[in-house]
Image: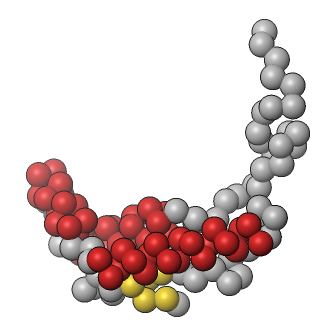
Amino acid sequence: MLKMLGRWIRRGGPIKWPTTSPDLTPLDFYLWGFLKAKVYHNKPKILEELKQLIRNAVLSVSTTVLESVFSEFQSRIRLVVANDGKHSLTGMNKHSQAAEGEVKLT
């Protein structure tokens, strides 16, 4: 049996790991919610329709929205670094999506 002393990552292990991690990545804190809202608003009936709605929703994300999301991503990373790797949802802006695809901070 291979032993990796001091190298495993999990709760209670030698490398401290948070029990839950914050929504740091743009996919987690923005894109999946945006796509779900946009795609299922149209209530697709068949798989091909669902695929096309997903493609259309991804293509509808504007450069302005991407810039805002990237800025939020940087802010979240800085917050985690400032907290010594611990996260705090206090101070993390949550993105919500308007129907037209705009990003609004709440």
**Residue 43 appears in view:** no
The percent position of residue 37, horizontal first and vertical second, equals 32, 74
In the rendered view, does 76 fall on the left or right side of 26?
Answer: right
Relative depth, front residue between 33 and 73: 73
From the viewer's perspective, is residue 98 above or below residue 19? below
The percent position of residue 28, horizontal first and vertical second, equals 49, 63
The percent position of residue 61, horizontal first and vertical second, equals 27, 74
Residue in view at x 71 percent, y 82 percent: 90
Query: Which residue of the protein is positioned furthest toward the top in this rendering?
Result: 1
Could you say which quadrant of the image residue 99 lies in? bottom left
From the viewer's perspective, is residue 91 above or below residue 41? below
In the rendered view, does 104 fall on the left or right side of 98?
Answer: right
Could you say which quadrant of the image residue 42 lies in? bottom left
**Residue 55 appears in view:** yes
Instruction: Tell me which colouring the rendered structure shows.
Output: secondary structure
Residue in view at x 47 percent, y 66 percent: 26
From the viewer's perspective, is residue 8 above or below residue 102? above
Could you say which quadrant of the image residue 1 lies in? top right
